[in-house]
Amino acid sequence: MTHHDPHTKQTSRLPLLMAALAIAACATLTYKVPQLREQLIFSHKKHVGEADCSDCHGDIAQATGPTEGKFIGKGGKHGGCTACHDDEVADKDQCKMCHVGKDKNIKLSRRTRNLNFSHKAHDKSRVKDGCKTCHAAAYTTTKPGTKMVPKMSVCTDSCHKKQMAELQCSGCHKNLESLTVPAVSLAVHDGNFHRRHGTLARNTQTCAQCHDQTFCADCHARTQAMPASIRFPEQINRRFVHRGDFVGRHMVEARARPETCAKCHGARHCQSCHEFRGVTPPKSNTTVASAAGRRVHGADVMKPGTPGFHGNQARRAINRCASCHDQGAQSNCVRCHKVGELGGNPHPTGFSWRGQSTACRENVMCGACHIAGAGCK
Amino acid sequence: MKTLKTTLCVLFGLALAPSVSEAQRLSLQTSTFARGYLLPGVDDSRLLVPFYQYITLHADELGTPGLSIEGSLWGAIQAADRDLDDNRAIGDVNVLFVRYAPGPKSKARGLELRLGRQFVSVGPALAEHLDGLFASYHLPGGIDVAAFGGAPTGTRFIYQPWAKIDGEFDYGKNWLIGGRLGWHYADIVRLGVAYRHKRYNDELAFDEIAWDAVISPIARLRLLTDGIADMVTTNLKDARAAVAYDVNQAFSGAAGYRYIRPDLYLPRTSIFAVFSDAAHHEGYMEFTFRSDQRRLLITAEMAMLRYEQSCTRGTVTGSTCSPREVELQALLRADAYFGWDRRYRVSVTGQRVGSPQSGMSRVRVAVNGPIWRELRGTIDVDAHVLDRAPGEDNAALNLSTNSRFSLSGSGYLSYPFAHNLSLLAGGQLAHTPLYSEVASFLVRLNWQFDRPKSSGPVKVEKQTRSSLFGAVL
């Protein structure tokens, strides 16, 4: 197979593929999940005045885990309803007292909460107003499906202020990946978190509350076999750097932020790929190096005064030069960029290093030009 | 295994194996990947079919309270045309260390010690990967002290392969040390100063000090500054000042300024470290909107980059300068969650990247949700248009399709067969301006073992990986 074939074939199939993807996306988006209040008539407000919470929610006061949706549970399909409504349950004509429509198979929420929470530890002896402290909505709402789980501020504005101030998230949250915590700006994972997470990570105690280092390794390990975007394609909301056709846009992103690539990638990484794809010649093949250099850098690479002149590029983003040419004293740049050669003195105006005089004589890199300290101040 | 360091890491892990078996809590996750893709080369396209194995381990309470082990390893074998990285089988240890962090009732509370291969993020050492020791201690009064030391890792991605000694790293000649002294008062003030010293082949590579400060004088407002100064050239390497304000729980915004010297990200051992001094200036703003219950998140970012002028004088060329240029970058992103349990997710991104001589506009739409029972699907479409085709001004560049347009689409299905076993399969097709992958497939099998089982009473579970069963959040 030549390298032209795959593109030609894929291009002809692309419209069909994209149409199929678009249809599937629309179908997924337009699917409607039945709402509980469209299936059931139930007023929490009416029931809290006539019954105790435990009449319907059983031994919730003894539960040691989060129990959202753990409605009644005992006594078959209708659970604890039969304790008061056994006549209505037995009479088929009374179904519509509670049920709306024909669908009687109502599925109550069984969502798993990623929380460490114990109802038992929050019993009435410790919480002043009992259940109402956190579940105030249950005392006012007249329709089912109303969110009963309290907002985090209910906890953090009252008993758990200290934990909030010190970002002790793991006491309650098993992980924060699926959550954003608006009031805790430092722990927010939405918005521009990807850009600033490095700064936040300087205080690693914050991250370490919820993330192991193996999590960091997904992206930051020096010898990652595959980009994280390939390993976790279903995690569409994470800001993986190398998504989609990254190779097709990497030169633009590298120009825009020259320091970014160098944080992870070194010369070997760029060089091995460029050599295989013919962007640059193998280092051993010096006979074709000059022609190949013009091929990848453009025809103006050696023409001063043109936008493509390599000097302009190098001054702006020297990291990009280093990604392929950093062979130390053997670098081809050194041949021209030294006093007396075409490139002249490579040091920018005002160049200075700490201990410059000693470094100039002892540093191996300096010695590439300043042989035996020649020219050192 | 490619390096002496990796071999030592594995031996280190084997020595710890008996302790792991005694751990009170043990979490073991494995991911097996089969991947296939075409790699277009200069003469021919090659088919690559590598198999990858990832293993992640976390063991707590190894006999002594507060003693734990974390590990993450991978291996790969190539089954088709071309070897991986000049070898048919490769692998490495990402993380493998012992951690001692006694609980709040211990006399040594506030202490953390880590020994082994690990990441360190302290001041200028951002995600530094090293084999060594890390220690931190929280003193009374909100004072934090942290220090680290060891040998930097780096094999395939190392900046300078010639820093190796006879094909292997020399622990004695590649090393770094650093630390941070910090102080915080509740959530009002956090200050820190830090230091990093790194040597390659016994030559000075980095010698830096850094600072970071976050001050919140009133609720919802934060003033932030951080930066790194290079002590060799006595220049700023990276500095930032920003202000962030949360209008309410729905709206927040931030604006800032950043100064960057890209050349100072090169180690001082690089021959290129003496060539350039051009700086970039960046001003940026960002806004975030979160709907009630965070079912809709909208993020807008704008940045303006100004590239400074830099001049040199050549013998023949005379004085030449890179021009000052200003480029704009922008990103608008929306993430929406549908269904009572947020089972459907949609992510839409529009992006503009301006850069000298070129630029790019990009759109991405991704959808994830259940299709039938536990079967979930993911569709991800990503397109970008380059301002200039890679070979537009250079006919000799025969590597380009001379197209400015790139379109890639991927589709994946995932299904959890059991509470600890899930399968994901799918692929990607792409039309690209360069010879990148045009077709690929991926099959992934995840397995998880927990002891004791996670259905027990309340206990803290750290996220040992990026959500093994990411579909079930």
Image (spheres, coloured by chain):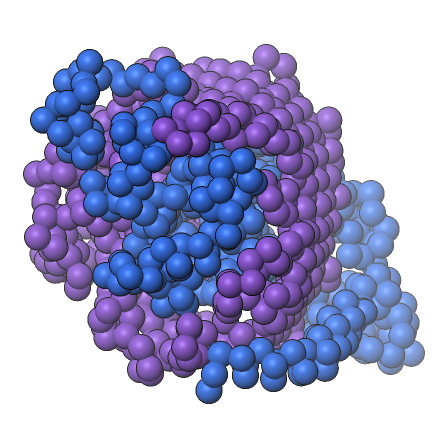
- Say above or below: B260 vs A356: below
| Residue A77 visible in the shown view | yes
Specify the colour of chain A.
blue
- Residue drawn at x 18%, y 18% as measured from the top left: A376
- Where residue B74 sits: x, y (%)? 28, 64
Q: Is residue A245 toward the left or the right of residue B298 in the image?
A: left
Q: Residue at x 73, y 60 (%)?
A: B338
Asked whether residue A190 appears in the rendered view, the answer is: no
Work out which quarter of the rendered image holds the C terminus of chain A and state it.
top left
The residue located at (36%, 55%) in the rendering is A290
Q: Determine whether A314 is above or below B94 in the image.
A: above
- Colour given to chain B in the rendered image: purple
Q: Position of residue A360 (x, y in %)?
A: 18, 22
Q: Is residue A149 left or right of residue B88?
A: right
Residue at image location 63% in from the left, 14% down from the top: B218
Residue A180 on image: x %, y %? 60, 43
Q: Nearer the viewer, residue A279 or A144?
A: A279
Q: Nearest the camera: B30 or A169?
A: B30
Residue B190 placement (x, y as % from top left): 45, 18
Residue A19 higher or lower than A253, as above or below: below
A300 or A221: nearer the eye? A300
Above/below status of B141 relative to B378? above
Q: Residue A209 appears in which quarter of the rendering? A: top left
